[in-house]
Image: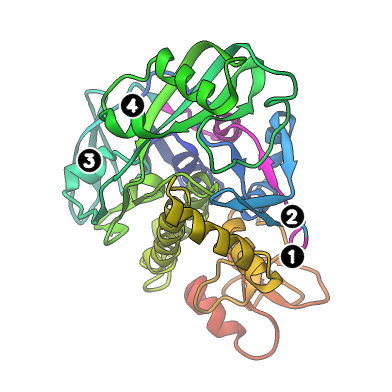
Amino acid sequence: MPDVLVAGAGPTGLLTAFELERAGVDVLVLERAPEPATQSKALGLQPRSVEVLADRGLLPAIEPHVRAKLPAGHFSGVPIDYRDLPTRFPYQLGVEQVHVTAAIEARLRTPVLRGAAVTAVAQDDAGVTVTAGGREHQAGWLVAADGGHSTVRTLLGAAFPGRPARTSLVVADVTLAAKPARLAEDWTLPSSGSGYLLPLSGGRYRTIVYGEEQHRLGRDAPVTAGEVQRALTAAHGPDVVLGEVLWASRFGDASRQLERYRHGRVLFAGDAAHIHLPVGGQGLNLGLQDAANLGWKLAATVHGTAPDGLLDSYHDERHPIAARVLVSTRAQAVLGVPDPDAAAVRAVVTELLAVPEARRAVAAELSGLGVTYAGVIGRADDPAGPDGRAVLVGAAVPAGWTGRVEGREGAAPRLVRPDGYVVWDGGPGLDEALRRWVGAPA
């Protein structure tokens, strides 16, 4: 019997499973789809996500698929320079999500169980029982990372307040039969206009279209080739000729968030915990950071070494971060409305974002590098421990913690949580920090 079940083999679920496994926890990932996804989906890794993947040795498998290193992010299409950010990776990596998930899945010890759609969840003080793919699976805990339409969230009746979608957009991977020279030849930051085109691998292109036609059609209406062609023609003229729609989906600007990320022995992460307009390159990265925060805390809980309140600190730390992203994406949605008043606001915001202090503040938020938590001093440059332990640099590991803390040499003393955040940087207080984040001494 596994220690933890994970529902959903997207990047959030897979990274959660990876974090648990490297800490010595047995995990089984349940995925409703019978085969791995081939759609491109999200297309960018923000600097903090690149740090996390690099520290865990996952980046080398992703790098061959990187199409661009973009030295900026964007706020509703307004470029935000990243080049002076305090990181080894002051850029976004332009890479299709499918390659990120494949790189993580390849490192799991236990294969993903596919064709296993969750249909029932029961829990008691001892653990959880999940019915998936017609079979019952038991474990001590369940992580629900099963997307914006989370089945687990529905089965548990978890409150998911927020605002419903007010507009509709289409995202599609397409081929082109013809296009003008120099159009969509390189990766660039998204503009604020409908019909944005971005080259993908294998002769494919990503496009995002929106307007009166998309707003009029229902969310369940199929995306037709004619609809996409009309949008491309309006954006680029008659020389753009659609070849084939390979994959398409309608999405809206709904903004919702779980009231609590923990429901007994079930914890929610990624889109299962929060949904928002996919603008500014936030969704994939927000889920990866949820996984990095949750994995080590749940592993310590499974091992019985977690201090009081450690697992609940997952909600306390991550809920405010996602709430802020929801505010940001709602603001970006307003700036993208094709309306003269919205255009006036956009012009003012663009001028404000040219002010260095304002630009740096927004860059820190979009990149994920500005994320901090109570009791955290800052981010560490030290790679995460290969076995998911905390890392103590420049000081001897005190007796009682030697099995749970990796000691390393270094001139600057610091205690680093398994997710890469410094919680002690010399002087008194080391024992207190160890007790808070690692647990009581053995």
What is the residue that sits farthest to the front in this orientation? 340
Query: Which residue corresponds to mark 2?
Result: 90
Looking at marks 3 and 4 on the same chain, the residue that comes earlier in the sequence is marked by: 4
Tag 4: amino acid: Arg
Tag 2: amino acid: Pro
Looking at marks 4 and 2 on the same chain, the residue that comes earlier in the sequence is marked by: 4
Cα separation between marks 2 and 1: 7 Å
Cα separation between marks 3 and 4: 17 Å
Q: Which mark is residue 32?
A: 4
Q: Secondary structure at mark 2?
A: loop
Tag 1: amino acid: Pro
Q: Residue at left 42%, top 59%?
A: 322
The reply to whether residue 55 is visible in this rendering is no
Q: Nearer the viewer, mark 3 or mark 4?
A: 4
Q: Which mark is residue 86?
A: 1
Cα separation between marks 4 and 1: 40 Å
Q: Which mark is residue 129?
A: 3
Q: Secondary structure at mark 4?
A: loop
Give the class, few, some or many, for how many residues have Cα within 10 Å of label 3's Cα (few <14, many ≥20).
some
Q: How is the image coloured?
A: rainbow
Q: Are marks 4 and 2 in contact (CB under 8 Å)?
A: no
On the image, the x and y values in percent for residue 37 come to 47, 23
Q: Residue at left 60%, top 40%?
A: 190
Q: Which mark is residue 307?
A: none
Q: Nearer the viewer, mark 4 or mark 2?
A: 2
* Left or right of residue 274, residue 154 in this image: left
The N terminus lies in quadrant: top left
Give the class, few, some or many, for how many residues have Cα within 10 Å of label 4's Cα (few <14, many ≥20).
some
Highlighted magenta segment, given as a residue range: 84-113
